[in-house]
Amino acid sequence: MINGELLAQMFLSGANNLYNKRNIVDELNVFPVPDGDTGTNMSMTAQNMAKSLLEMKSESITKTADVMSFATLRGARGNSGVILSQFFRGISKNLKGKNECEPSDFALALKAGSDVAYNAVMNPTEGTILTVAREAATAAISADNDILEVLKAAVTAGNDALSKTPEMLPQLKKAGVVDAGGQGWMFVLEGALTFLETGKIVECDAKISTETTEKKSDAQQKIDTQNIKFMYCTEFIVEKRDKNVNVLNFKRAIEKIGDCMLVIDDDEIVKVHIHTNNPGFVLESAIRMGAMINIKIDNMKHQHQSLIVEETKKEDEPPKKYGFVSICAGEGIANIFKNLGIDVVIEGGQTMNPSTDDILNAVNDINAETIFVFPNNKNIILAANQAKEISTKNIVVIPTKSIPQCVAAMMKYKETNDKETNEKLMNKASESVSVGQITYAVRDTEADDKKIEKGDILGIIGSKITSVNKDVTSALFELSKELIDDDSEFVTLYYGEEITKEDAESVADELENMYEDIEVSVKYGGQPLYYYIISVE
């Protein structure tokens, strides 16, 4: 039988193994640019789970699986991290209500995790982590009813499927690599298998801090723990009496008596977290929905724990109509966003995708009826949508994939418009701008029918490498030919931290000479890794 302690040890070992080998996963990135962060995102997501497992006392397998699901859900970074969180969400749902489980039940839980992950991806593609996880789970179900044999079968089949991913996706074959996400999941399963075979948890190369790593605003950091407004951290799970219980009414009943509220309606259970001075009222309201389990109430003031609260001076102020959260890397771009009216700028982007929790914390910093979130990176959109799903606030995600798209969207915002009109106008504006980027190759490869050597300067539009050069200026001029046409009027150059203002202005002058009918403006972005971001309207 598998109990909660064994499950925790298995996946703690798996999370550590992934962390130790994260660079191997990063290097499998098909696109030869300096943002191959699948390993980084997956390992940081898994380490959030590992931290929670270390803090947890020995519990039932249901509680352990819930902890893993909740921690990866909140700690998910990048698309790969969000998909990983969906694996654990499926595992948690399948093991619900069990104190222990048979190895065959664990195999079915792996399959449930695979199914939930498939359903979470809008257009699932074979040859990815989804294929690897499915084949691993299928083999696990067919194995003998012994946990060691189940995991051995999963690892063998998963690695076999992983080796075949280049045959399923041409871009993997051209790059000569296997799928990065699939490799990451295999490192998790292999780490779990190592524990079963040796009885020892794979040691993490870096010490996992069990202290809070939650980033606070300047105002929040000034709040002393002795002046905590809501004293009791209250957590529990409700097993629904029936699927039609009104969870929304429960949310409305408790939201005014606390903060940091999180209510996740997950099919047959409801996960609840809130900081309050009246846990009794919360429990009394919850019991109307069904039976409560895993109740945990901590006196945060007594334990001197940190607590996020809104600034006292804002508590009595009515919420404004709209608020804005945006993600970017670069001091100059952050200042541009603030000047456009963005309330909270999260530092992140290429190579450092913020977590779902980072986005939730930013949203919670804003006292507004509706909050627009701009991911500004295709690898952050899933995390933003996941934050929207679990937040109690009214969030609208504008799926921007670049900095210029966010700028264009904010230029169309009007406070007098209703939410739907603003959302429509912002989406339309973000889609109308053409965007290119100049960066460098991190390895030799072949992509988009171009032979690329490490150190080459790349011109990129969307997910396509349009030019390969040996110097930045030539790359910019070649990229401009792809972006600028007879209908173009305005070009904006956001220059990065490695480009001087003088060089950027010189390039802008040459562009205006090359294209008589366009106006070129230069803005300091300060972004790392990308020499220029080009916006054409």
Image (cartoon, helix red, strand yellow):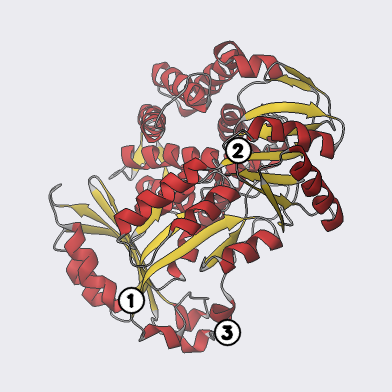
Label 1 neighbourhood size at 10 Å, few (<14), some (14-19), many (20+)?
many
On the question of residue 245 being in view, the answer is yes
Q: Which residue is mark 2?
A: 199
Q: Is residue 280 left or right of residue 394?
A: left
Which mark, residue 258?
1
What's the CA distance linking mark 2 and mark 1?
A: 43 Å
Q: Is residue 215 left or right of residue 363?
A: right
Q: Amino acid at mark 2?
A: Gly
Q: Residue at x 35, y 41 (%)?
A: 100
Q: Amino acid at mark 1?
A: Gly
Q: Which residue is mark 3?
A: 222
Secondary structure state at the residue bearing disc 2: loop
Depicted 308 relative to depicted 394: above or below? below
Which of the two discs, 2 and 1, labels the residue nearer the N terminus? 2
Which of the two discs, 3 and 2, labels the residue nearer the N terminus? 2
Which mark, residue 346?
none
